[in-house]
Image (tube, coloured by chain):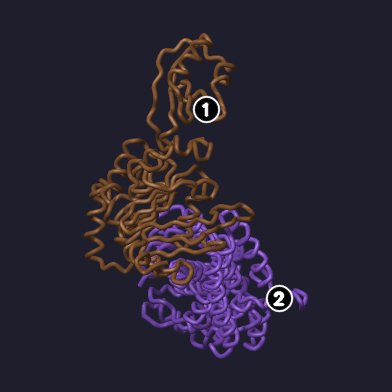
Amino acid sequence: MRFLELAKRCLKETYRDPLSLGFLLGFPLVFMLLFGFAFSGETTPTYSLGVLDHDQSEISQAFVDEALATAFEITLYDDSSQALEDLKAGDLRAYITIPQGFGEQVYQNWQGEKENIALDITYDESDLIVKEQVISMIDAVTRSFARIEVPVTLNASPIHIESEITYIDFIAPGIIIFGLLILIPTSARMMVRDKEKGILARLLTTPTRPWEFISAYSLCLFAVGIVQIIIFIVIAYLMGLDIVGNAGLVFLVFALTALCSIGIGMIIASLSKSENQADPLSWLIAMPLAMLSGCWFSIDMMPSWLQSIAYAFPFSHSIEASRSILSRGTGFEAVTSDFLFLVIWTVIIFAAGILLFRRKMTI
Amino acid sequence: MSKLNSNTLAIQTFALTKRFDGLMAVDSINLEISRGELFSLLGPNGAGKTTTINILCCLLKPTSGTASIMGYDIMKEPFRVKELIGVAPQETTISEHLNSWENLSLIGRVHRIDSKELRKRSEELLETVGLLERAKDRVGKFSGGMKRRLNLIMALVPDPEILFLDEPTLGLDPQSRRAIWDYIAELKGKKTVLLTTHYLEEADVLSDRVGIIDEGKIVALGTPDELKKNISETNTMIISAENLSAEAIEGLRTSDRYAEIDNVSGKLRVWGKGLNFREVIDYLHFQDVTIYSAALEQPTLEDVFLQITGKELRE
């Protein structure tokens, strides 16, 4: 297979060049870390915690006043529905329910008997801070209060609150798509560099067909794109992105988006004579597309005519599809039309790429 | 075109023309190059040599006219043509981050040569041009001469019927140039070679036939000896002298006699048809010029070129 040989060369040229490798991998890394830190705010965390004390014993009151109060801002509730409402409104990070018999269980522990202790915690499942920090804080506080070695059984009951999607959940899909838009200049650069150096001309004197060139470059760039997507997702996850939906499905959306970017990059490369032409041209296309597609803010704010332009490109579709899969957990049925749009776009852009290559890729 | 011609001709062009925005790069060239022939296109920079090669390699579309390679039309069956040719471009085009093996194998693989055969051929080629020991090093670290040699043998990996070598020794030191000449000389008779050069010696030493190209036109065609013989009525005298005045030089010039100071050697050069040695010497004596030496010179391709185009090859 000719295109496999060409793709192999392309990959070798990429990973053996420390500078280009550094850019291709370092860029998404730095980029995602920066955005992650910028949007994961909250520097001095004092979490507000609701408490429903069903035990009403001296021990349970001491637990609330002396143990929990040292770590949290406590609000006492009599009624769980009121607590739930405050949780939904965002006044509470979580609330715990101290069950009846809690005091007795703790007393048993103090007497040296290994008694299990259970607490119920309710929180918003998209709130990663609760998942990672608050629960472990409650666990630690309870264990030291009850003087037990065994972990406390915390009956966590996460609830899903749609209105409470955190900022990172909202921003991450857009930032990842922006990262994938950068594949436009990357692709254009890779192809136009070979053109400028005459390597393409040399290969054009061999029986290699246009589609084989396109496939080779795409394969190589797609491999780069896949690695970038993995970096993006892993860092976003570490930064607090909540992956509610199917990770494979969202990966597919990103992969199709990468292909669209590669296609656009190839068309720019076909139209440019040198890297000096291709570079500004591809940024000139990538940046407005990022803005227009809603990488940084919701496109709902834009006038409708601008929105229709945005929807003519695949990127706003990918942002919306990935956002709804990531933070609302929607399945394939809900994003079918976005998917279809991405697939059609990919097919068209590649067909155009091959046609243009045929016409323009001579010296 | 007769049946015989189509069987024996490797390259044939039919009023091949290429115009770039009003500039006539190739102007109605008709060439016939036989199989196994080593043909040189000799001309200054910008004469249209590379453009001609690029058209024959199916990289550029001619504005008008066409060409056939081993009987295949370059416009109608470019991929057939591409299977038969090997090209060493003027600019060294190699993948800098690959080693020599990988560079050779890339070209071999896209020509669908199986890996065993490819390995054998690559080894032979690397051995011949003295790169075998460094074959596993990234070519980015190579010297200019080594890169040129690799650039050349990459054209030979597919074992092509026809070889296009565009300025194969451009910018090389004399030693590397000599090594490449030796190698090209070995190919003589085995392959059809179309070579472009603006080094006269290269064309003279290597070629079966030379086409002198200027401003897109073939202005002279023949074996190096034929070309030189054609102007042999023209003699050249090289005179080393003192007290040469501009008037004395001007006085030497007649309608068919030329005289000028050679920029490189500082010697006086006089040439023309039926040049009379005695007459020139007597005239210079009469002008009070002190003559140290004077000799008749054998014509070179440079003289041919100069006479035909009125230009120096090397600016």
Say whether residue B143 is left or right of residue A98.
left
Protein chain holding label 1: B
Which element carries disc 1, helix, strand or loop?
strand
Image quadrant in which you'd find residue A36: bottom right
Residue A136 visible from this viewpoint? yes
Q: Secondary structure at mark 2?
A: helix
Q: Amino acid at mark 2?
A: Ile
How many C-alpha atoms fall within 10 Å of the one at disc 1: few (<14), some, or many (≥20)? some
Chain letter for the part of the structure drawn in purple: A
The amino acid marked with disc number 1 is: Arg
B104 in relation to A231, above or below = above
Which residue is painted at 40% across and 16% down in the image?
Answer: B293
Rendered location of residue A272, percent (x, y) = 58, 60
Q: Residue at x 35, y 46 (%)?
A: B207
The colour assigned to chain B within the rendered structure: brown
Q: Up-down: is B149 above or below B4?
A: above
Instruction: Compare residues A55 and B213 and report the one nearer the observer.
Output: B213
Q: Which residue is mark 2?
A: A309
The structure residue drawn at horizontal position 36% and vertical position 46%, both measured from the top left corner, is: B223
Judging depth in this view, the residue of B177 and A8 nearest the camera is: B177
Point out residue B38 in the picture as x, y percentages from the top left corner.
34, 51
Question: Foreground: B135 or A160?
Answer: B135
Residue of label 1:
B257
Q: Count the numbered circles shown.
A: 2
| Residue A67 visible at all | no
Q: Nearer the viewer, residue A278 or B297?
A: B297
Label 1 and label 2: CA atoms lie apart by 75 Å
Q: Position of residue A298 (x, y in %)?
A: 69, 74
Q: Chain of mark 2?
A: A
Numbered tag placed on residue A280 in the rendering: none
Query: Which image quarter holds the N terminus of chain A?
Result: bottom left
